[in-house]
Amino acid sequence: MLHYIEFLEQHGSRFVDGAIITVQQTILAGMLAIAISVVMGLMRISPAGVVRGLATVYIEFFRGTSLLVQLYWIFFVLPLFGITLEKFTAGYMAVGMNLGAYGAEVVRGAIQSVPRGQYEAAVALNMSPFKRMSRIILPQAVLIMLPPWGNLLIELLKGTALVSLISVADLMFEAKQINGVTFLSAECFGTALILYYLMARLVISPGMRAFEAAWARKMGRA
Amino acid sequence: MFDWKWSFTFEIMPRLLWATLNTLMAAGFGYLIALVIGLIFALAQRTGIKPVTLVVREVVEFIRSTPLVVQIFFVFYVGPQFGIRLSPWTSGMIAIGLHYAAYLSEVYRAGLDSVPKGQWEACRALNLSMQRTYFRIIIPQAVPPSLPGMGNYLVGIFKDTPMLSVIGVAELMHTATAVGSETYRYLEPYTMVGLIFLAISLPTAFGLRRFEEWVRRALGMNR
Amino acid sequence: MNKPAYPLQLDDGAPIVRFSNVTKSYGELTVLDALDLDVAQNEIVSIIGPSGSGKTTVLRMLMTLEEINGGVIYVDGRPLTHMERGGVLVPANNAHLREMRTNIGMVFQHFNLFPHMTALENCMEAPVQVLGLSKQEAQERSEDLLQMVGLDDKMHEHPARLSGGQQQRVAIARALAMRPKVMLFDEVTSALDPEVIGEVLNVIRKLATEHSLTMLMVTHQMGFAREISDRVCFFYAGKIAEQGTPDELFAHTKNERTKQFLSAVLDAG
């Protein structure tokens, strides 16, 4: 135990640095994923077949291939098409685009779960489709989609670990580096695992629950 | 810019296809391990012995909430630290098997919980042993609602095999990277990897949905 | 559907609602069969009949919640389901529907109040967002209406805190806030507990007697229909089997089917 405390004293700051990068990646990827999910989710229920089809292609493609493959493709292959991304950017973009595909299905499911009577009442009151969706349907859909989104955000956090493979200096990257020097693998990767766990269980899950409670209150339902 | 060489593609395909076989084997074995250990995790939480339930619960949560790739590194590198040399393949199987066991245990739990309480009570009333109760009455009813989740994770484990490449397992991604670094051409290998994944995961997902329907009908449960 | 048999516009003095040879089918099933129905301005019409007879479909089509398969519906002299293009009637586009819809309001069986808004906000929503009223105007209008339906003390409550009867009264106020010319009531008491049906019927009675409003009601409340309607229509198999004043329909029933229906309903109490 003493041995571990020594280890932490010596290398702790590097773990923290890595964790900060991980948090940044998670937040950026998260924002991208949410934006993509809403757009693709709405496209999936569009009356226009072409729009629906485009969204379906995106979703099936990003869900049918693994994040690692997508990440490598974006970082190693896109430059051949003239799009060279800096590795930090490539990292969160790949994670965001990947999780966005899963999120799109969650958004779509939630919108379709809002009772049909709400849609009919809005039509009866002659609301435009845009106002209908933004003021009546989506606010109710948000409450429905929050629990699955909690899980998705944890998947997002886990996904960011892969960006270490394109040398982004995140938590896992630092753990690998320290392991390469000290060979204390249990301490290195164990610490990394614990930090990821703490971020997931002590930040993301309670955070989502609090957000859910706040939204429910705003909707007069608490 | 768009410099696709078909001749090169055909050249490397045999290697990629062999590697695909390796990938499928890794996924298959990993899934089998996960199926069994997942069941153990799930049943362990139903023993009624508080400490056991709590410990297993926390272990499952821990595995589910942390990245698989870090777990893979952990299993691979920790062994040598304590004198045990594990091959990439073995560490990979252990890590992926445990990871997906955690996911599957949640699927099993939900499936078991979905069986109505009355079923348990009827078994008690008929004096069936715990073994009979579980294997002949409860588990068959827990299976149909669990199938979608189990199917999703089968596809998921297949898509996660590329992570094994980081410890040198010669699966598809690793082979593609090797080809890339040998020939300095990444476009064809990585693109083919993506297409191969799509070609396997999409029909599999589709086939699984059909299988679920079939099982539902076969067990006479069209809920 | 757009043959010259249907005028581009009705003459002055024409009924405010006219169904002209209207047909509606779902696949093989014909729900409305070449229906002709006129409703005069300020007339109160009750529609009764067995389920599947097409009565709710009449209201839903008028509210543009269902598409038409044959014939034309006119509202306030102009076609609702169709519009004029180069001298002929063609199926209406969304812009035309939105223009015509302002004339019609609807109260639903299951209220369909917006759960994330208070009663007041529910009423204010459409006047502000659709009619472009200022928040203040919309609020004044909504407060008056909520007062009229007897809910001024519940204005700031969310639907989850209101009883079914209260919710339905808010729904009525919400529909009235748009000042439609025609109000549709689709079995508005069918989902209510018996003890709160009265409070909703009182509001409708008030509307009928104190305000000039054209009202179309699908209802199972025979006593109520008899009391306040100018005309009652009995629907059977997508057509009007019989119609007349309440006295004519209830006391001097001519049609066999109507008689059967009425006696079955009375038996059920």
Image (spheres, coloured by chain):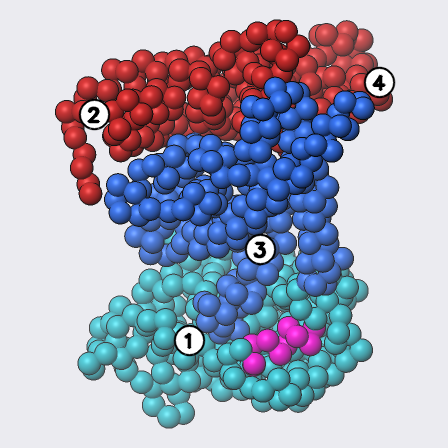
Q: Residue farthest to the left?
A: B7
CA separation, marks 4 and 3? 40 Å
Residue A141's tag is: 3
Residue A31 location (% of width, % of height)? 53, 53
Magenta segment's dominant SS is helix
Q: Residue farthest to the bottom?
A: C12
Q: Colour of chain C?
A: cyan
At x 24%, y 20%, the residue is B13
At x 36%, y 27%, the residue is B197
**Mark 3 element type:** helix
Q: Quadrant of residue B162?
A: top left
Q: Chain of mark 3?
A: A
Kindly indicate whether the residue at mark 4 contacts the one at mark 1 (C-beta within 8 angstroms): no
**Mark 1 element type:** helix
Residues B134 and B123: in front is: B134
Question: Which chain: blue?
Answer: A
Q: Which residue is mark 1?
A: C98
Q: Chain of mark 4?
A: B
Q: Which residue is mark 4?
A: B49
Q: Which residues make up the magenta segment?
A: C119-128
Residue A177 location (% of width, % of height)? 56, 29
Work out whether B46 lies above or below C234. Answer: above
Kindly indicate whether the residue at mark 3 contacts the one at mark 1 (C-beta within 8 angstroms): no
Q: Chain of mark 2?
A: B
Mark 4 vs 2, N-terminal side: 2
Q: Which residue is mark 2?
A: B9
Residue C60 location (% of width, % of height)? 48, 66
From the viewer's perspective, tell me whether residue A209 is left or right of residue B13: right
CA separation, marks 1 and 2? 57 Å
Work out whether C133 lies above or below A33. Answer: below
